[in-house]
Image (cartoon, coloured by chain):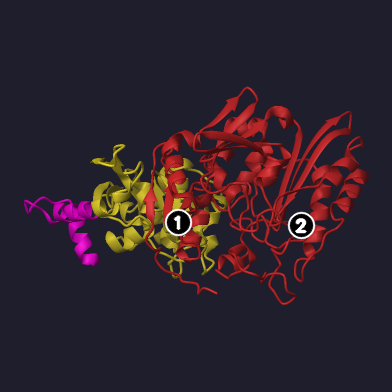
Amino acid sequence: MNQEIIEVTEETTQQGVSRRSFIKGAIAASAAVSSTNYLFRANGGTVLAQAPAAGAVERLITVTVNGRSRRIEVPPMETLATTLRYKLGLTGTKIGCDRAECGACTVLVDGTPHYGCSLLTHSVRGREVTTIEGLEAEDGTLHPMQQAVMEEQGFQCAFCMSGFIMNSVALLNENQNPTRKQAAEWLSGNLCRCADYDKILTSVQRAAEITRGA
Amino acid sequence: MKGVIRDVIPQLELFQPNSADDALAVLAEHGSDAWVYAGGLDTLDWFKDRVKRPRVVVDLGRVESMREIRSTAGGIEIGAMARLIDVVNHPDVQARFPALAFAAKSAASPQIRNQGTIGGNVGQDTRCWYYRDGWTCYRAGGNICYASPPTAMNREHCILGASRCVAVNPSDTAPVFVALDAQMVVRRGRSERVIPAEEFFVGPEIDIERMTALEPGDLLMSIRVPSAWSGSRVYFEKVSDRTTWDFALVNVATALQESGGVIQDARVVVNGVAPTPVRLTAVEDAIRGQARNEQTAIRAGDISIQGVSPLTHNGFKVNLMKNLVRRSIRDEPMNEV
């Protein structure tokens, strides 16, 4: 099923009547069946026209991920972390607790850190999502925070790393010279079970240096 | 008892209206089948565990008008969909009600404050784990409280105000709104009503299955904080196991009007100790007209714990509440954001 969905999400028009538009049509047809509750009726009960209820959502939506506009089929109650990992194949985003209590799934939405496990993909419709895969430059140059983690050996098992790095990137975008205390407070919504906090904060300091060109 | 399922969320019908009118229309149509979704931090736990399974979800995330924080002639009006971080950073909130900004900053974690809303923070459900794990307790429509027997794990539960259910209100901003005498603006269809914060929170003796006065079809639109206590000495302090994520074991919000070192008026509120934020009127009466000094503070603390009834594992909350009430009168407000 994932393979199928990944194919239809690619922005391609190679096939004329694409699989994407076929599936879109199929979804629209099923939506029409399920929204019979919302038929407009004149006084006599005649069906005049069909209009969706205000705010009803479509399953086929567009989300911008790492600068690319992605057309994806998303059930209403799917979380962003699930969509990223299992629809878009962006498995750099980890799911730890799945309860907004560990920070491993932290991604940026319009530059702001959010727990991807606790945000509906439908809530980021039309917004910019940045994941760990979107940090490096086109020529492969690592983001200063990634480079700093390499230099400082910031993490041990590194399951929490993507979340920490994404949150640190948001910090550095706002403050290129954070104190350790400021960084610790900013990163307090991320847990590291290896307790590498000291090395993580050193990495943030190093990343700030790289960013400032020091 | 339902098993706890950690899995994808079951199918629900999602609405993302662009206006409050549209949201209210959907809520009116679906009544108790509909669930109001704000930041989603409380909601998604319920859905993932499949403990609450509404048929329709109304996500207010696209109702821009409900995110506004504005100064009015009478004070500040905070849209229910303003994120906690918006409340923390708003210059008028910081200038006029620094304790409110401080309390909002004390809640949850940075990422949650980037998404969680002020309406969600005051309207959130209790964190009693028996209830949240799907045990069919009183609050879940059952016939027993699993948290109150001597063998239960009830370190975080009530020390006063219990009525069958011993779960507490977990909000950090709620006691501040009660202390500041805020007004909750609630809409249902086209009609609007304004409820004092003190009456907005309801305990199990009124309705054991709800935490607030909101009924199906109701929407909390905004919270009005009147100027009356702006410029007063407002103290907030939260004690929790960790400074991030954890809910308050006890928190306190005390607003004092002083003149010449004498307390002219006071509103003293604690949360985390009862099913609702509790206004300690006996303490207020005792300190009104008194000099604000160590002696008055000690007396206030002693009075605050009269009538408490701790459970097996939460006796520590009694001293904690006594000391927090004492400090809230004696010490200078921290109110850092």
Residue drawn at the location 47% of the way across and 66% of the way down = B50
Q: Is residue B335 visible?
A: no
- Sort mark 2 into few (<14), some (14-19) or many (20+) by Cα contacts within 10 Å: many
Give the drawing colour for chain A: yellow
Give the drawing colour for chain B: red
> What is the three-letter code of the residue carrying label 2?
Gly
In the rendered image, residue B152, in percent from the top left (x then y), is placed at: 69, 74
Task: Using the rendered image, report if marks 2 and 1 lie on a common chain.
Answer: no
Q: Which stretch did the figure color magenta?
A: A1-30
Q: Of residues A172 and B223, which is closer to you in this image?
A: B223
Residue drawn at the location 61% of the way across and 47% of the way down = B122
Q: How many marks?
A: 2
In the rendered image, residue A22, in percent from the top left (x then y), is placed at: 14, 55
Residue labelled with disc 2: B161
Q: Of residues A157 and B307, which is closer to you in this image?
A: B307
Quadrant of the snapshot with the C terminus of chain B: top right
Q: Is residue B184 left or right of residue B255?
A: left
Residue labelled with disc 1: A118
Q: Residue furthest top?
A: B73
